[in-house]
Image (cartoon, rainbow, N blue to C red):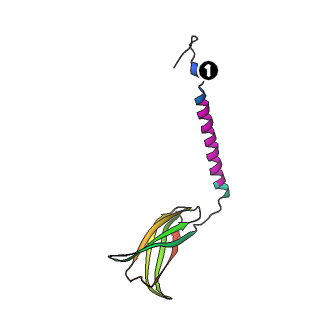
Amino acid sequence: MTKNADGKNIEAKHPHWIEWLTGMISAILVVVLIGIIAKDAFTDKDLVPDLSAAVTGMEQRSGGYQIAFDITNKASVTASQVRVLGELKEGDEVVETAETVLDYVPGRSHAKGGMVFRSDISGKTVALRVSAFNEP
C-alpha cells in the first residue's frame, strides 16, 4: 500500500475509477439476477411435467431395428424415471412393443433415447408415448 506523508493510505482516500465501475457492474448484475429469480418464483405455474415423444431416426442393427427418439419437456418442472412405451404397428394391430426408462428430463429441455425392435420395421409404423414419470 502507498502511504502519504500523514501515514494514511492513499487508496482509501481516492479509490481508482475502475473500482467504482466494477462495483456498479457487480451491483447491477446482482439486482438483475434477483429479479429474474423472483419473477420465476412468482409467475411459474407449472405443477407437472409436459412431456412429448418424437421419433428422430431408425436404423437396422445387429440386434434388430433401432429407433432413436427425443423426449421434450415443455414445463419448467423436471421429470425423473420417464417411462417411454414404443409400439410397432401394422395397421391397427400391434406387432411388437418395447419400453425404456430415461433417468430424468429437465424442465424446458429435452433428452434423447432409443429402443430396439426385433421385428422388421419396413412398412410398419412406430408409435411412441410417455407412459409414466416421477417427480424428483
Residue 9 vertical position relative to residue 27 in the rendered view, above or below: above
Nearer to me, 17 or 104 = 17
Residue 66 locus on image (x, y percent): 39, 75
The majority secondary structure of the magenta stretch comes to helix
Residue 38 locus on image (x, y percent): 65, 51
For residue 10, what is the image quadrant? top right
Q: Please name the residue shown 42% across and 83% down the image.
A: 122
For residue 120, what is the image quadrant? bottom left
| Other-residue count near label 1 (Cα within 10 Å), few / some / many at <14 / 14–19 / ≥20 | few
* Residue highlighted by disc 1: 13
Nearer to me, 70 or 129 = 70
Residue 70 locus on image (x, y percent): 49, 69
Mark 1: secondary structure: helix
Count the marks.
1
Residue bounds of the magenta highlight: 19-39
* Residue sitting at the far left: 62
Residue 2 locus on image (x, y percent): 53, 18
Residue 53 vertical position relative to residue 21 in the rendered view, above or below: below
Residue 125 vertical position relative to residue 108 in the rendered view, above or below: below
